[in-house]
Image (cartoon, rainbow, N blue to C red):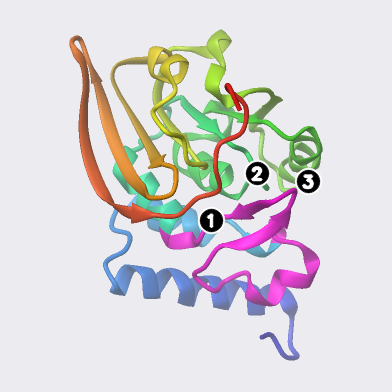
Amino acid sequence: MFWGGDADDDFEAARERMVEALVEAGRIERDSTIAALKAVPRHEFVPEARTNSAYADRPLPIGSNQTISAPHMVGAMCDLLDLDAGETVLEIGTGCGYHAAVTAEIVGDDNVYSVEYVPELAEDTRERLADLGYDIHVRVGDGHEGWPEHAPYDAAYLTCAAPELPEAVVDQLRVGGRIVAPLGTARQTLVKAVKTEDGLDRESHGAVRFVPMQGGDS
């Protein structure tokens, strides 16, 4: 918890400690990911009643039966995507906008396109991101359909678990593009896939637990 002093300084110090602990534990590695996690004020993305837990490395509820992912998971997914400045990225599941903001710190916020299924979340998050100075593109829609108008993307990721990689999202990746997503229902696995001329090269990165993806045939 934060006691006395300047709240912004307290939050910044807590954020620095959190990121340093993730680096020390080997949970994040790329310099760009480390810098992005240090830059994004996670306490601005959680409900006010949860701000004292903002820099604990765990998911937190944000309403609408959704959660903000644990910082180590956001960082790990950025690492796996091998993101570089200037790349265009499609996010499925905007949520509160934290993951999109971290991604934007790496690639540039005008390069992040995010689809949110819940209209209320999308509206609140657009406002939050704008207030924080991010120019991230957010639309309401079914993530299974991706966002074809801005394809092809260099990378894509899901912040929710799907039984399989959404076909439309894969189609909207360029050849050589990467996608990271939790796949499965009762048991989930974090999967990275690289799009090739012949299909997808996949690799698994351990068990995870995400909220289920909405839309599609559900």
**Residue 170, horizontal then vertical, whole percent:** 38, 19
The residue to which callout 3 is attached is 131
Q: Residue at x 25, y 26 (%)?
A: 194
Inspect this view and state whether residue 130 appears: yes
Q: Residue at x 23, y 44 (%)?
A: 204
Q: State which tag comes first along the sequence, 3 or 2.
A: 2
- Of tags 3 and 2, which is closer to the observer? 2
The residue to which callout 2 is attached is 95
Residue stretch rendered in magenta on the structure: 44-72
Q: Residue at x 57, y 25 (%)?
A: 143
> Disc number at residue 69?
1
> What amino acid is at disc 3?
Asp
Q: State which tag comes first along the sequence, 1 or 3.
A: 1
> What amino acid is at disc 1?
Ser
Q: Residues within 10 Å of mark 3 (few under 14, many from 20)?
A: few
Choose top left, top right, bottom left or bottom right for residue 165.
Answer: top left
